[in-house]
Image (spheres, grey):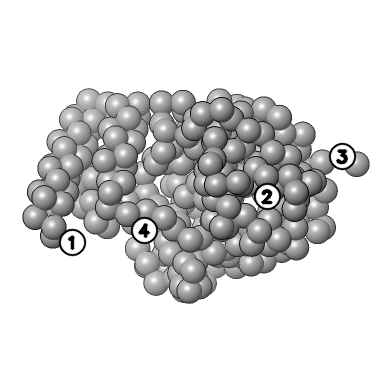
Amino acid sequence: MNIELSVIIINYNGLQFLQNCFDSLIQNLNEINHEIIVFDNNSVDESTVFIKEKYPNVICIQSKQNLGFGVGNNRAVAAAQGDYLLLINNDTIVLDALKPVLEHLKSDNSIGVVGIKMLNKNKEYLQSSRKFPNPRNMFQMKNMLRLENEFKSGIFIKNSYEVDWMTGSFLMLSKQTYQEIGGFDNDYFMYVEDVDFCKKIAELGYKRIFLPAFSYIHFVGFSNSKNPQLIKGYEIYIDKHCTGINKFICQCALKTNKYIKIFKTTLKIE
């Protein structure tokens, strides 16, 4: 059986999410010849034991250290047999059949990557598509990079939208495109690697397409304690992708936001 789609999941102590994630994938990939590959970043919560006992068909690659999100994906993709890839977080539940999503990707060679609508645990809309960093939007950390209109309300009138970037919790693309951009940048450990990933796809002239008719639940785990990692990610991004006066302005804006966050954290201001 030729594998068409390789599903890549990075896991770190995600035992509580795995069954729902796997079951939703199996249900919604039943029309696609696929494999599921989990790259485990040295979990200590019996994740790998659970996978081997309950889901023996899932390929589990065990790392002896936590290599982070991007490197983990690169290692797993190297072992993937499918011509297409679905990069999806372990704390997700897919709600719709994914065959039409894959067919949309395959129908147009100008599409580099596809994403779908993200919902929170209460099935409320979360914005998963955003703008690339620029001097203007880097000054608004709280609403930084957000798209307006339909993306703000979550009420969509079109079947597809071309966007700048989409969250790494669900990205579908060809393995060829993944290899063409060199996968994820190893400089990122966690956060902003998905922005960089989509930026590299854009630089090759490929579209980033959002399909709002299909959705998944994401148990988002971000908290204010992770802001330093987020800031660090954007520092790397700006250094890589911005030049001249734009780079200087973005760096100043990010530094301002950094110190504002430190100030708020010190005073316990939300």
Q: How far apart are marks 1 and 4 (CA)?
A: 23 Å
Q: Distance between the residues labelled 3 and 1?
A: 51 Å
The disc at residue 2 is 3
Q: Mark 2 points at which residue?
A: 50
Q: In this view, does 150 lie above or below 33?
A: below
Q: Position of residue 38 (x, y in %)?
A: 65, 41
Q: Which of marks 2 and 1 is nearer the N terminus?
A: 2
Q: Which amino acid does label 2 sit on?
A: Phe
Percent across and percent down for residue 133 are: 31, 42
Q: What residue type is labelled 3?
A: Asn
Q: Is residue 63 visible?
A: yes
* Residue at x 23%, y 51% (from the top left corner): 141
Disc on the earlier residue, 1 or 4: 4
Query: How many angstroms separate mark 4 from mark 2 (CA)?
Result: 39 Å
How far is mark 3 from mark 2, CA to CA?
27 Å
Task: Give the residue pinned by disc 1.
Answer: 270
Element at label 2: helix
Disc 4 marks a residue whose amino acid type is: Leu
| Contact check, label 3 and label 2, Cβ < 8 Å | no
Q: Would residue 95 appear left or right of 123 to someone viewing this image? A: right
Q: Earlier in the sequence, mark 3 or mark 2?
A: 3
Q: Which of marks 4 and 2 is in front?
A: 2
